[in-house]
Amino acid sequence: MSWQIINELLILASVDAEFYQELIQCGAVAALRRGFQLTEEEQAAFENLQVKDVYELSRVVIERIGYKK
């Protein structure tokens, strides 16, 4: 798992409204289309997203992946 890739993906979603919409509608498929290489666990974190904004997207994805402080 690469937190760098997850961070890049979430940053792109925060500055590119079109990508954000694709991501919450198509999940990991949108990320893969943009060239992000995700593990199966990371792909699963982007499925069935029901979020209201990019901040909630970040929180949900990080929780699903299991970020440890």
Image: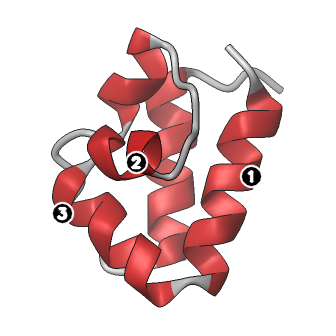
Q: Amino acid type of disc 3? A: Gln
Badge 3 marks a residue whose secondary structure is helix
Label disc, if present, on residue 8 of the rendered structure: 1
Above or below residue 43? Residue 19 is below
Please tell me which of labels 1 and 3 falls first in the chain.
1
Mark toward the start of the polypeptide (1 vs 2): 1
State the image coordinates of residue 46 (x, y, percent, origin top left).
35, 41
- Apparent side of residue 11 relative to residue 56 in the rendered image (left or right): right
Tell me which residue sits at (38%, 27%) in the image.
43
Determine the secondary structure under disc 1. Answer: helix
Whole-Å distance between the Cαs marked 1 and 2? 14 Å
Residue 50 location in percent, x, y?
20, 61
Residue drawn at (20%, 54%) of the image? 26
18 or 57: nearer the viewer = 18
Which residue corresponds to mark 3?
A: 25
Q: Quadrant of residue 2?
A: top right
**Answer yes or no: do the residues labelled 1 and 3 have beta carbons within 8 Å?**
no
Residue type indicated by callout 2: Arg
Alpha carbons under labels 3 and 2: distance apart: 13 Å
Bin the neighbour count of mark 3 within 10 Å (Cα to Cα): few under 14, some 14-19, many 20 and up.
Answer: some
User: Label 1 vs label 3: CA separation?
Assistant: 19 Å
Return the mark for residue 33: 2
Residue located at (50% from left, 74% from top): 54
